[in-house]
Amino acid sequence: MKRPKLRKASKRLSCAKRYKIQKKVREHNKKLRKDAKKKGLKKHVKKDLGVPNSAPFKEEVLREAEQRRLQIEEEKERKRQAKKEERAQKRKKKTEAAVKETDPSAKKARKDTTANKSEKPSGPNKSSKQHLCNELNKVIDASDVVIEVLDARDPLGCRCPQLEEAVLLKGSNKKLLLVLTKIDLVPKENVEKWIKCFQREFPVMAFKGSTQIRDKTVKAKRRRVVASNEVLDKSKGAACFGNDCLAELLTVYAAKTQSEAALKVGIVGFPNVGKSTLINSLKGMMACHVGITKGTTKTMQEVHMSKTVKLMDSPGVVASPSNSATSMALRSLQVEEGQESVMDAVNTLLKQCDKSQIMLQYNIPDFKNSLEFLTLFAKKRGYLQKGGAPNTEQAANTFLTDWTGAKLSYHCKVPGSYSLPSYMTDAVVTEMQNGWDLDKVKEGNKETLKGVKFPNLSSSISFVSRGPTAGLLTASATPDEPPSTDREEQHSDEHDEPEQTESHETEELEEHQEPVTDKPRQVQFQSAPVDISLSTVYTDNAYDFNTDFK
């Protein structure tokens, strides 16, 4: 419907405005022509002048040009026809597919083909113990120098006697080197004592890796504030100490070998001790994937540090089930795979620590057991479920990641009477230390300890270590012994008398019991006569309804 008494807006402009627009257009076109001239672009294409009359063999040149033009046109026509045929075939296939969908027999055939595809054998399970042990053995066999990475918070518990013995049995060609990582989470005095303790067996290097290494292929974001003299980049996570000394030590040893091939260095150790972080720090870029969860690395990976040194990353050593519950909670993959309860792992760790230090570290009031601790911890962090109930499972996972990751500061005391293992003889010690510049190792450790900022002894949690952790190099070597609990080891002397009385009771019970068989038996219940008459009911406190209805 036409609106009454309304006219269209006039398009007429004032002369000043019109001239201004024309001037802007001219300036814009001039700028475009200028940019095109800089880039070498030409707006006008030169016209083909053809063959001049004075040129010799003009008719032959024109004939050849006409033949070439005809060939090009024929080629275009051929491609056009081929596209038409393809379109016709696609239409035909679509119509056939629509007919098959309506046909029930075609549906059955399609289901059979999908079932056959699903039944195809899958690849090897990379999380299995057999695969992890095979990859670890590959690294040990291929390497010339084996670096065992130890977490400085519990270095004795990170040592694997089976792994060290396997490396020593390979011969004198292989060297074993110990590297203490995460030293920034341990008091300085404790680190120095562990270095002195382990130097009696193997050369020991102190190392603090960088946790903020990025991939060089990824472009960094532009920042408005540029760090002067890289002050902002020297943060606690970005700083790396001990990498230059370790890299120089390996290059010098590679030069002494005088072999044309590069020196192969295998990095081994339990999960979450910092193997991949060590490689990334030596390489100076993100070469290996790093994760908080245990078992991130599942296969052997080779990284070229230089022309003469090649690093080999390996999966974590599989912990034996015969270890204590504390060692299994910190270094086993069972918690990550869901085979062991997270609550049990937290309970075993809390038993090995001082309660007052845990309360100060997490700013939590006094608690009686692990469940109460996780409830308070969940409320403190805001881990709540529907209805405001505390999520204890999430709190337990966070607590475990703090202990296994590079976040929580705790330390283990060096044992006063530490004796060398049986496989470490004087000949083996001299053979392992031969070929290394031990003076340079000591100087490098001193420089590393000077640069690192260590926590105070009072702010670090004291932890009770359970000694070296047994590992598996073959999946078939799983022992049948049940895992020993820390509670039994601690309180074995306190409960001698009650155990003797319990043993007499169990002996009397075993005399009346039948011998245990492997076959499952059905439980049989004996029916007992029950008297349910009103005379047997105890009616002193019963309510009498007759008092209200008389």
Image: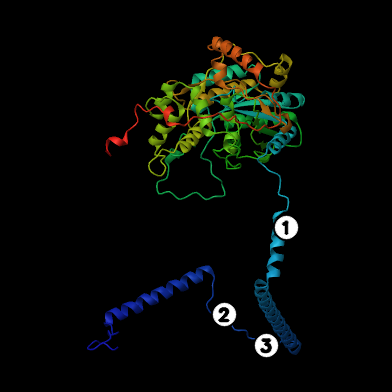
Report the quarter where the C terminus lies.
top left
**Distance from the alpha carbon under mark 3 to that under mark 2:** 20 Å
**Is residue 337 depicted above or below 353 in this figure?**
below
Residue 338 picture quarter: top right
Q: Secondary structure at mark 3?
A: loop
Which kind of residue does numbered mark 2 sit on? Val
Which kind of residue does numbered mark 1 sit on? Asn
**Distance from the alpha carbon under mark 3 to that under mark 1:** 72 Å
Neighbour tally class for label 1: few under 14, some 14-19, many 20 plus, Cα within 10 Å = few
Q: Position of residue 12 (x, y in %)?
A: 28, 85
Q: Which residue is the extreme one toward the left?
A: 5
Which kind of residue does numbered mark 3 sit on? Pro
Mark 3 highlights which residue?
A: 52
Mark 1 highlights which residue?
A: 116
Q: Secondary structure at mark 1?
A: helix
Mark in the foreground, 1 or 2: 1
Residue 300 picture quarter: top right
Query: Closer to the camera, 270 or 8?
Result: 270
Mark 2 highlights which residue?
A: 45
Specify whether 74 is left or right of 498: right
**Distance from the alpha carbon under mark 1 to that under mark 2:** 62 Å
Report the quarter where the N terminus lies.
bottom left
Q: Residue at x 64, y 16 (%)?
A: 200
Q: Residue at x 64, y 21 (%)?
A: 438
Residue 62 picture quarter: bottom right
The disc, 3 or 1, on the residue closer to the chain's N-terminal end is 3
Query: Closer to the camera, 64 or 142?
Result: 142
The disc, 1 or 2, on the residue closer to the chain's N-terminal end is 2
Q: Which residue is the extreme one toward the front?
A: 550
Q: Residue at x 56, y 21 (%)?
A: 486
Residue 547 is marked as: none
